[in-house]
Image: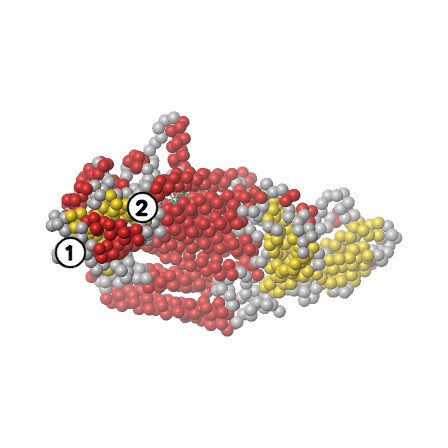
Amino acid sequence: MSTTDTDTAADKAAGASAEERELGAAGSQLSTAPSEEISLPSLGVLGWARWFWRQLTSMRVALLLLFLLSLGAIPGSLIPQTSIDALKVQTFKDKHPTLTPIYEKLQLFNVYSSVWFSAIYILLFISLIGCIVPRTWQFIGQLRGRPPGAPRRLTRLPAYTTWRTEAEPEQVLRAAQRIMKGRRFRTESSGDAVAAEKGYLREVGNLLFHVALIVLLVSFAAGQLWKFEGSKLVVEGDGFSNSLVQYDDRKSGQLFNSDDLAPFGFQLDRFTATYERSGPQMRTPRTFNADVTYWDGADGAERKTRIKVNEPLEIAGYKVYLLNHGYAPVVTVRDGKGEIAYKGPVAGLPIDGANLTESMVIKVPDYRNKAGKKDQIAFQGQFLPTWVRSQGMFSVFPALDNPTLVLTAYHGSLGIDGGTPQSVYQLDKSRMKQFMESDGTSKYARALAVGDTMKLPNGAGSLKFEGVKEWASFQISHKPGTEGALIGAVAALVGLAASLFIQRRRVWVRAVTGKDGTTVVEMAGLGRSESAKLPEELADLAVRLQADAPPATEPEPERQPEPEPEAQSAPESENESENESEKESAPESENESPESDGEPASDSGPVAGGTDPADPSEGAHA
Amino acid sequence: MNLAAEVNETLANYSNVLIYSAMAVYTLAFLAHIAEWVFGSRSAVGRTAAAITVEAADRPRAQVTVQTGGNTAEKGGTAVLERPKVVTRSAAGSRDVPDGPGAAGGSEQGDVYGRIAVGLTVLAFLFHAAGVLARALSVQRAPWGNMYEFSTTFAMVAVATYFTLLALKKNVRWIGLPLVTTVLLDLGLAVSVLYTDSDQLVPALHSYWLWIHVSCAIISGAALYIGAVSTLLYLFRDRYEAQLEDPEGKQPGRFASSVLERVPSAASLDKFAYRINATIFPLWTFTIIAGAIWAEAAWGRYWGWDPKEVWTFITWVAYACYLHARATAGWKGRKAAYLALIAFGCYLFNYYGVNIFVTGKHSYAGV
Ligand code: HEM
């Protein structure tokens, strides 16, 4: 029925449907969707360039690109991605030595930043811009223009009604215009008819939606380019201040400048966690709370707050998220001379997820042996928040029910003097010797409860297990463009709703003096889609109009529909459309209208019926 | 020892009993629907429906007069107010085929069984809803913390959507049998394979966005499911109509005719599916936005290409594809319908496939 075609030249080239030609200008520009032109380009570079541009901005290609985008997103969800879990990628690579080089070539470990994925969405967005710009101009043109005049035969429109009245035609038309204006139609009166149109917001919504998609993408890109993200492990009682050196690890976008790091900091006062004690989900964490004191700016006031998993601390454009937690046993290490060589908490590295067994490494670089000679010692082992002797060297519950520190000790060179960075969680034992029990054969190891002390053999020193602190790790991130993305998303939603739920439609009212001297009033409606609401609205308008143009008393004889031969003859409608000048409503309809009184629906019988306001499939041309 | 609410075991057990009862009643509804279809196939109207359909395709049908005002003109035809008769006219090129008479095929006995089936479905739904509610109360949170809960709630919302459409006087009774069948399958799967004892959530799931995001996802999914069933039936019915239109070509088999002649016309099914999908698309868009806001709050990034996120995005793009296809020449009709089915397939995969086969940040919900 109606048309989404806009540009009439392309219209003809593409061969608009018979229906469209029949309705002519009445149905034109109900939407500003691009025309589907499939004609081959004329020769020449310019011709080809134009052809290419037209192809790129056509619905067909937009559809193809959308489809490719969803297909292209699939591998990234099935193959481990470096940006999400680098460790998993490494495991995958180790397992699949033959696939790996192929995958690497295809950038399948970095799908979402790969050349091909980027190509798809960049093309899509070029297409989108190429679609939006001309549509916006067209739409502005339509806003400035007037609703098209009434087609010659209103009977052919999807919704139609007619009656006779004693009122004068002019009076009827004036009333019609007033009523429709009152219902916020834009109206235009010309000759024997009034044209009205409504629902421009649909197109506004559609344009808004597509523009919002661009806003979303730009914000997303800005977020990627200027982002900064780092993590920091903080033991209870310790603090953090926002500078590069403080981060345990960090990532930043290509355009982020580290001088821009905002000065703020916080101290972890206390961390508390609770766990499920029974049931099938025993030992799953129930609450994580990090109580912190924070300050904004180099000498900002101190404030206290609680950071939870879903509730980050927002400060100076940064967000501080609670990421993880674990235990840090507090130890005092004395050297061979009885001096304190190290005192404080040492964070352990959780090695089993649920029960928080941690691997421990305690490095003591400043150490003198019994003879006072410089040496280095280290302790290695595990920390078990809940140790049950019969269950082996693994914790059985994540809370501190029976905290136990199991350690063995080494001495020699830690290998940290060369300046090569070393993980605090790993011990390079290549130049260290393990302490042995006094029997000389078995390795020295001890399990300590809080308060216990292990004495190294031969008076080499001691380690006292003083207590346990919690540590929490935080992710500190700064991502510009988040507000933009949110605004874009909300605008997209609003635009989408407008574009899907608002119907653009036109109504024409024609009033002419009929053969018998009474006035024949005809009303017809056309929407972008065949809608159940359109006939209803038309009926509504008709009822209102009948207040001013009451139907003539003499009732119409109800006759059964007879097919009007004229209505079904295709050739005739073809002829009509050839004649462009006839398209616009014209006075010659006078003779027609009376004919079509009674039950003009016989025209083409029933309809497939009520639809949603804006079914585009109805709007699009065949 | 923990601040979270204790699990109320009694309520959890009630919930299980209620779900099993609901399944039993759904099974009865299923049998009643079968009876409806069987009697319908024997009815005279049912048998002649095919003939009517062909004829109707050939000549303009007499006008159907539907009152406007109170209700929408449901089928094609004429919307009549007191005086003005509004005549509607269909799009060029579309088949003018009336909707089938419904599962009961005009058979009175079939219709009685159909009504019984709907009544039983209402009863089953009450058990079902009570079961979901008891589960929610037993854990004192939204009843969609794991796949078992998600499945039971999902089926409940699908049935509720069906009732809503029925209450709006939409022509959806034909969907009763496929709906009850899938609800039974879904609940069966939930209680056998996906069952998880009721329990609390890990801290990352504590957020009111859980309510918003997941409830929207469930409502979207349930409605999209009904859209997908309608689309699938459209494909069958469309082929059936095409075969009738071409008497020389291959004709539909007896069983296919018996079923398809009773369902709504291809055009109605297609439009119904479109209306549902188009109505739900903004809600699905909102679901994604809500998820992104939650992810921003919980993980510090609103979008991270996590498998669940990726498949939500794929589903969204697939439905956008479908909407575009409907506006593109040469793509509406069957091709658009295939896209809609692919899109719903993506939704299903996102739910079952991603939860079971792919690990990501979202997989801690517990299968
Ligand atoms: C990121 C990619 C895109 C998405 C997610 C998207 C989404 C949508 C959606 C959901 C609709 C439905 C609105 C309706 O049915 O009225 C729509 C309509 C439309 N889109 Fe897009 N779109 C995208 C790209 C494009 C591109 C590249 C073009 C240009 C070729 C385009 C042109 C249109 C047009 C013309 C309509 C209106 C169709 C009509 O008048 O019925 N879209 N789009």
Residue sitting at 17 percent across and 56 percent down?
Answer: A551
Q: Which quadrant of the frame does ligand 1 lie within?
A: top left
Figure check: B176 above or below B338: below
Q: Position of residue B26 (x, y in %)?
A: 37, 67
What residue sits 31% from the left and 43% below the top?
A146
Query: As displayed, is residue A301 above or below residue A104?
Result: below
* The N terminus of chain A, quarter of image: top left
Q: Amino acid at mark 2?
A: Gly
Q: Chain of mark 2?
A: A
Camera-side mark, 1 or 2: 1
Callout 1 amino acid: Ala
Determine whether B14 is above or below A106 in the image.
below
Instruction: Answer yes or no: is residue A267 visible.
Output: yes
The residue wearing badge 1 is A552
Q: A452 or B95, which lies in front? A: B95
Q: Is residue B218 above or below residue A562?
A: below
Where, by quadrant of the figure, is residue A96 drawn? top right
Q: Quadrant of residue A397?
A: bottom right
Task: Say which mark, if any, is on residue A619.
Answer: 2
Q: Is residue B196 left or right of residue A400?
A: left
Local packing at callout 2 (Cα closer than 10 Å; few below 14, some 14-19, many 20+) is many
Identity of the residue drawn at 77% across and 48% down: A414
Question: What is the crowding at mark 1: few (fewer than 14 residues within 10 Å), some, or many (at least 20)?
Answer: some
Position of the C terminus of chain A, as image quadrant, is: top left
Residue B268: x and y, percent? 29, 54
Q: Secondary structure at mark 2?
A: helix
Residue A463 occupies quadrant? bottom right
Answer with mark 1 or mark 2, whichever residue precedes in sequence. Answer: 1
